[in-house]
Amino acid sequence: MKLGLQLGYWGAGPIDNAPDLIAAAEEVGFDAVFTAESWGSDTYTPLAWWGAATDRIRLGTAVSQLSARPPTSLAMAALTLDHLSGGRHIIGLGVSGPQVVEGWYGQPFGKPLARTREYVRVVRDVLAREGAVANPGPHYPLPYPADAPGSTGLGKSLKPITHPLRADIPIWLGAEGPKNVAQTAEIADGWLAIFYSLRLADQYEEWLAEGFARPGARRTRDEFEVAATVQVMITDDVSAAVERYRPSTALYVGGMGAKEKNFHAELYRRMGYGDAVDEIGALFRAGKKAEAMAAVPDEMVLETLIAGTADDVRDQIKAWEAAGVSMLMVTARDTETIRELSTLV
């Protein structure tokens, strides 16, 4: 089992102690540190800024949103950071959701699976640098078609000026549904699993196996990384841990998506919390956030939480490893937790 530090995206301001957290994580042997983006801070700027003070730890995005950048732009950022870090970058990608994609980026959300497949292919073509990059589309046509609206007809296929340090920077994909997870196993090098649940571990493995069995799949299960985001608290008071993370469960289930389409809510339905999901969502949409938090059952929080004494946490980590998780991406926000976690793996 590897450990990763998930810094996530910023709230109203930067994470004040991020440099200390990253330094501690590298010192005690964490494998990677990750940044995220939503509709505020971006992934690459903090990762490059903070990563400049590191020597060994891998630097990953979890996730960079597809709609935030054309695939060629993402590839430029990736090859640049990979050079600057001496080959330590992990590209983590995800489609986000329709509210963000259409409301923030002003782009259509339709066909997320097809868009992801095409996006990854273009990124790999840029990094391979085997020739001018061309893509027929339909989502990311290169060059822009001469007969398309606003076209001058002067576009030409190009290949990157800068030679990538690695032609095969690992690409991990954020995925939650069965089709998306299966495609991730087929075309990617790792799976970024948010809200991983041991209850669904066998189901996850079935979805992954479907992807690995497809013709041309990049990896076998043994070569593939499963990185699960998880909150970990070493404590004698598990109830306090539940209270600490109840608000975030309510937010993602009730507030991070529309009533008609919320991938996080759908995931919790698969875990068996359909009635709670309905209640939390209705309260959140009505502006009753406190009531929505109160409606989250304890066991729903514990589903994606590792909490207990040091011995309890060690046993739970072993269970996650036995289920197929190769990296725990922890959301620790103090150096003491980071140091203690390193002794339990």
Image: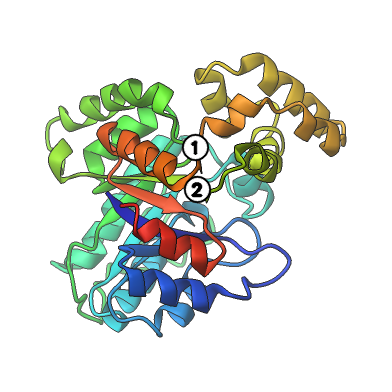
Q: Residues within 10 Å of mark 2 (few under 14, many from 20)?
A: many
Mark 1 and mark 2 in contact (Cβ < 8 Å)? Answer: no
Residue nearer the viewer, 100 or 193: 193
Q: Amino acid at mark 1?
A: Phe
Residue occupying image coordinates x 26% and y 75%: 160
Which comes before the other along the chain, label 2 or label 1? Answer: 1
Asked which quadrant contains residue 301, the reply is: top right
Asked which quadrant contains residue 180, the reply is: top left
Q: Point out residue 76 in the picture as x, y percentages from the top left corner.
A: 35, 72
Residue nearer the viewer, 203 or 327: 327
Q: Amino acid at mark 2?
A: Val
Residue nearer the viewer, 281 or 325: 325
Residue occupying image coordinates x 62% and y 71%: 15
Residue nearer the viewer, 115 or 192: 192
Asked which quadrant contains residue 115, the reply is: top left
Q: Point out residue 54 in the picture as x, y percentages from the top left corner.
A: 36, 81
Q: Secondary structure at mark 1?
A: loop
Q: Is residue 202 above or below residue 100?
A: above
Residue occupying image coordinates x 27% and y 49%: 1
Q: Which dot, 2 or 1, sits closer to the camera?
A: 2
Examine the rendering and report whether any part of residue 142 can be seen. Answer: no
Q: Is residue 191 above or below residue 294?
A: below
231 left or right, relative to 262? left
Q: Which residue is mark 1?
A: 195
Q: Point out residue 85 in the picture as x, y percentages from the top left corner.
A: 30, 79
Residue 74 got which mark?
none
Q: Which residue is mark 2?
A: 232
Q: Secondary structure at mark 2?
A: strand
Q: Residues within 10 Å of mark 1 (few under 14, many from 20)?
A: many
Residue occupying image coordinates x 43% and y 73%: 24
